[in-house]
Image (tube, grey):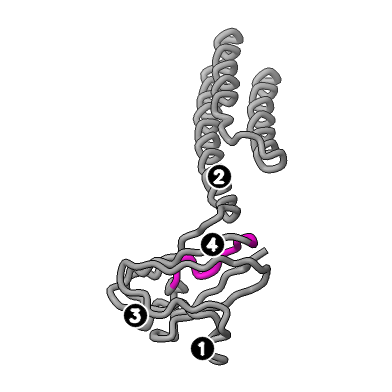
Amino acid sequence: MDKMGIIVTSVVVAVALGFLLTDVAGISLDISPSIEKTTTSIKETTEKLKISESGKEIVEKTYEKTKQVSEQVKEMGQAAKELSSSKLPARLVSIPSGTSVPGCEKDGICYDPPSLIIFTGAELIWKNNDSSSHTVTSGNIVDGPDGLFDSGLIMSNETFSHTFNEAGEYAYFCMIHPWANASVTVK
């Protein structure tokens, strides 16, 4: 059983190193080949050692769990790519269908995404996916427009864009449907 412990420990260390390298060093997120190589090595070692049936079950479960972890790492990689998209020169914000009817504010999806982070010099593009006209007006419903940007009427399936050249927090809302509001942080 000591040899089995070493094998299981090796797999756990390999997976942990994969997570560490992915999170800390920004190394490629595709570690599946090294995990598969490790699990293949485990199977070969298992056959050489001729361990008991319960040991084989443990190795097979470890192999399956390693495959699951590999898939989770790939999914986390996709999430990391999504987060890094905040550095893109342009981002899209949707005005979803149904925004013209009160209720979207309860779910926080009158603008999708309702808040985001971009960097100076980036452009936001709002697309009206609703059947009603909307505006994208800087400011808030209590104090009113602050004059930094205003789309005017955005008809259904049309867009409005604005480039943010200064860092700061920018709130915006729809002049026609005041429950629709959101914000952007520019760094």
Label 2: how many Cα within 10 Å (few below 14, some 14–19, many 20+): some
Q: Which residue is mark 1?
A: 141
- Estimate the x, y position of residue 69 in percent, counting from the top left: 55, 37
Secondary structure of the residue carrying tag 1 is: loop
Residue 76 is labelled as 2
Under mark 3, the amino acid is Ser
Magenta segment range? 111-120
Label 4: how many Cα within 10 Å (few below 14, some 14–19, many 20+): some
Counting residues from the N terminus, which is met first, the one under dot 1 or under dot 2? 2
Which residue is at the front of the view, 92 or 107? 92
* Front label number (4 vs 1): 4
Rendered-image quadrant of the N terminus: top right
Which residue reaches farthest left? 131
Marks 3/4 in contact by CB < 8 Å: the verdict is no
Marks 1/2 in contact by CB < 8 Å: the verdict is no
Residue placed at 40% from the left, 77% from the top? 104
Under mark 1, the amino acid is Ile
Residue placed at 57% from the left, 79% from the top? 148
Secondary structure of the residue carrying tag 3 is: loop
* Front label number (2 vs 3): 3
Counting residues from the N terminus, which is met first, the one under dot 2 or under dot 4? 2
Counting residues from the N terminus, which is met first, the one under dot 2 or under dot 3? 2
Q: Which residue is mark 3?
A: 100
Say how many tags the image has. 4
Marks 4/1 in contact by CB < 8 Å: the verdict is no
78 within the magenta span: no
Q: Which residue is mark 4?
A: 123
